[in-house]
Image (tube, rainbow, N blue to C red):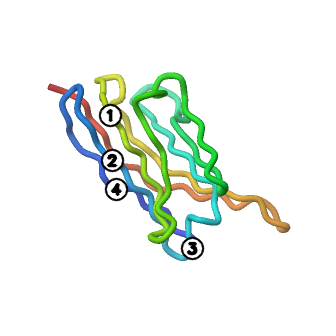
Amino acid sequence: QVLVVESGGGLVQPGGSLRLSCAASGGHLSIYNVDWYRQAPGNQRELVAGISTSGKTNYSDSVKGRFSISRDATKGLVYLQMNSLKPDDTATYYCNAHRSTFWGPHVYWGHGTQVTVSS
């Protein structure tokens, strides 16, 4: 069983930065495609950024140019660097690790980390 854990959330002023981390116990994130999602109260969960096992990245239009997703292969971590934060970025951020196998898809979610952007 793979347990995905997010960390790094907190309270930051508009224009500030945070770096979120995603780790997996019982597995190694290097073999998974990893996505970051976020969900604000009353809103649907939305995809923010993703990185494939080959390192290909993608971003939602709302964060493109401000957020950056990356891997640390030696530590088995995935980061979401968030710069120029806005109040609209306030949400719970979730890490999703997934891959396809012969036996079917493996999909794991973390419990989320809260990011609050406020002055």
- Badge 1 crowding class, 10 Å Cα cut-off, few under 14, some 14 to 19, many 20 or more, is some
Residue 52 drawn at (x, y percent): 64, 51
Q: Are marks 2 and 4 in contact (CB under 8 Å)?
A: no
Q: Which numbered circle lies on residue 7?
A: 4
For disc 4, the neighbor class at 10 Å (few under 14, some 14 to 19, many from 20) is: some
Q: Amino acid at mark 3?
A: Gly
Kind of element beneath mark 3: loop
Q: Is residue 54 left or right of residue 109?
A: right
x and y, in percent, of residue 51 in the image: 59, 48
Amino acid identity at mark 2: Arg
Taking the spot 33% from the left edge, 31% from the top edge, the residue there is 90
Q: Is residue 11 left or right of residue 101?
A: left
Residue denoted by label 1:
83
Q: CA distance from mark 4 to mark 1?
A: 16 Å
Q: Are marks 4 and 3 in contact (CB under 8 Å)?
A: no
Q: Amino acid at mark 1?
A: Asn
Label 2 or label 4, whichever comes before in sequence order: 4
For marks 2 and 3, give the CA distance: 22 Å
The quadrant of the rendering that contains the N terminus is: bottom right
The amino acid at mark 4 is Ser
Name the residue that disc number 2 marks.
Answer: 19
In the image, residue 103 sits, relative to residue 49, either above or below, namely below
Query: Viewed as shown, does residue 68 lie left or right of 56?
Result: left
